[in-house]
Each structure stands twice: as structure tokens, then as C-alpha cells.
Amino acid sequence: MSIEDFHQFLKATKASHRTSRQIVLGNESADLDSVVSSLMMAYYQNLASPSDSIPLPVINIPGNELRLRADILFLLDRLRTDPVNLTFIDEINLSDSTTSHTLSLTLVDHNQLAPHQAHLIKQVSTIIDHHIESGRYNQTVKKATQPVGSTATLIWSLFAQNRPHELDRDLARFLLAPILVDTTLLGDPVKTTDLDQEAAQWLQAKAQINTKVFYDLLQAKKRDLTHLTAQEVLKKDFKAWNWNAQTGGISSTPERVEQLLKTKSELLGATKKLAVENNFDFYMIMGSGYKPDPCRDLLIWCLDHQLIERLTAHLQKSAIGLEKVPFPSHKTQIQADFYYFRQINALFSRKQMATELHSFFGIN
């Protein structure tokens, strides 16, 4: 099999996307790992169990937001994959009451539906994910969950064990990309596992590519925010959760919040607008920088002063090690209901933050 067979598969899914009942749904951040993994998981399912019903990979953002993800567009272009053959969440109606009960959902790169999709919980049949298990789905759901660096590693494992010949040079590069990005070129001591190392070594042998150059190109595209508005920066890598009666969201950015405030003057207004539109109890922006060393800062919007005090006290005692610092000097008058911190542990990711939030709200 080859990349051309993969392209033909995508064209077939697009042609039947309005009638497909077998959905492979990535998470709502639609980052590189989520997009690649949902596409490749659907492709694997089709190869493993060919039938009249073609699995439909769905990118869990509106189609017009793909432009915000330059790293994904770069990878698609390198593999000659036309985005016109991708299906986005605004192109199908998963909530149609006449047909939603017949859906079969495979969740990829998440194990808990986004709050606005939670009504589809009974349609979830399979989960493949590298995040901490939420435990919200019954025992009839097939699960392939493991705390590895990237969901793409788990997708690779399925191919390597059952259909290794299906991965040509280009498809190997496709799967390799998110593994390199999510593990920081296999150098992140927290995220990188032996299975990630094994997957990357196997895929690199097939991909025949300089992984350092490949990784640097992907990262350069991912970190380029110059063409985006503040609102687009926030939506570029965004997730939401609900914990019983509480709701919250986190945007992850490849620049520190302090730096973003210098270049995106409307950042605070955009933050509050997104939080209010989603009825969040709190909303975080996790910023990150890499020069000269990894560093992270955190901006939190919250109207409930008691909630923010309890939440930040919990996080300060956790592995993240929050430190409250003065708001960046060029924005001396921070708006009410905003709180600014430095992360002492610069390796503490959004995935780990979500785990701490689950703990704080009593969700195991």
C-alpha cells in the first residue's frame, strides 16, 4: 500500500461523509497528534475490517480553522494530501436525533467527549488515547489507552503488529511527525516512553528522513503566530472540560503569555470573550517558551474569587509549582478577574494540568 491508497481512502470518505455512521473523532484541539491519529486510525479500521461502511475520520474543528494550524498544513503539503478531502465537524451533524443513535464513535486522542458533545456518550464504542483515563465509559467500550507520549505511537503499534506492510515511506513520515513533536524529539523525560522510542526508530527506518530537520521544520511552523489574531491564537490549541457542575478550558500557546501581550494587545479581551461565550467558571492560557531554556507561564481568568484561591492553592502544592509573579510591566494594570503565574516546573504540560484539575474537582 502507498500514500496514493491513503489519498483514495480520504476521497472515498469525503464522498460518503454525510451518510457514514462509523465515525473516528479526534479531540477538539485538533493539534497535529489528534489530526494525524484520527486519519490513520480510520485508515487502519478500513484496512482491518473492510465493509460497505467506510470509517469517517472527523477533524473536530470547523474547516475554516485549519488555517490556524500551519504545522498540519505543512505536513499535509509535504505528503501531497489535499485538505479538501478532509471532513470537519461543521460538515456533518452528529446531533441529528433521527440518526445519532445509529452512530458508532471511535474517540482518538481523548477519552472524554467535549462538553458540547457529551450527549453522544452512548455512541462511543472504541477509545484510543494516551491521556489519563477518565473512567466515564462503561465496560463495553473497547479501549486502547496507555500513557505514552503520543496517540500516534498507539496507532503505529496497531499497524506494526497487524499490517506493517501498509506503511510506506510517506505514511511512516505522517505517523512519525506527531511522535517527534509531542515528545520534543524524544527528549522529554516525562512524556517519552520506551514505546515512543521503539515507534520512532521503526518509523524513521521506513521514513528515510533526518528527524532533527523534520522536527525543526514542524516546530517552526507551529510556533509562528505572526499571522494570527489573539482570538485565533487562543483557538489554535484549545480544550474544554466539565467536572460535575464546573466548566473550564485551557488554551496552550507556543509563546509565553508575557510575550504574547507585547504582540497581541487584544489578548485579555479575547480571553474574557472566549470564557464568557463558553460559560466557563475559569479559563487558562498556558504559555511556553524555549530560549534559552524551556519556560512556562500561566494566565487564569476566573470570576469566583473563592474558586481561584482554592484552585491555585491546589496547583501550588502539585508538581507544577505555581509562583505568583507581578503582571508583565508593560501591562501594569491587569484587568480584574485575571491572575498571572510562573510555572516552576517548565515540563508540566496541559495533559498533566488536566489530570490535576480532575483531581481538584474529585474526578478520578
Image (spheres, rainbow, N blue to C red):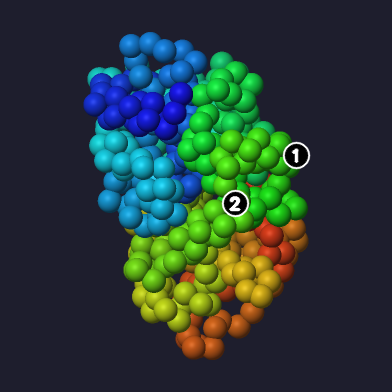
Q: Which mark is residue 181?
A: none
Task: State the residue in front, 114 or 161.
Answer: 161
> Which residue is label 1 attached to?
194
Residue appearing at x 71%, y 41% in the figure: 197
Circle nearer the viewer, 1 or 2: 2
Residue occupying the far front of the picture:
208
Against 131, residue 13 (above or below) is above
Quarter of the rendering occupied by the C terminus: top right
Q: Residues within 10 Å of mark 2 (few under 14, many from 20)?
A: few
Q: Mark 1 Cα within 10 Å, few/some/many (few <14, many 20+)?
A: few
The residue beneath circle 2 is 210
Q: Quadrant of residue 202?
A: top right
Instruction: Estimate the x, y position of residue 233 in percent, counting from the top left.
Output: 41, 63
Q: Is residue 42 above or below residue 297?
A: above
**Element class at badge 2:** loop
In the displayed structure image, the side of residue 206 where residue 91 appears, left or right: left
Specify whether residue 87 is in view: yes
Between the C-alphas of marks 1 and 2, the distance is 21 Å
Q: In the rendered image of this protein, does residue 203 appear above or below residue 359?
A: above
Q: What percent of the width, then of the height, locates residue 32?
A: 48, 47
In percent of width and height, residue 362 lies at: 65, 43
Task: From the viewer's side, name the closer residue of 145 and 225.
Answer: 225
Kindly identify the amino acid type of the residue bearing the numbered disc 2: Asn
Residue drawn where x is 35% and y is 26% of the image: 9
Residue at 44%, 41% (x, y): give it. 35
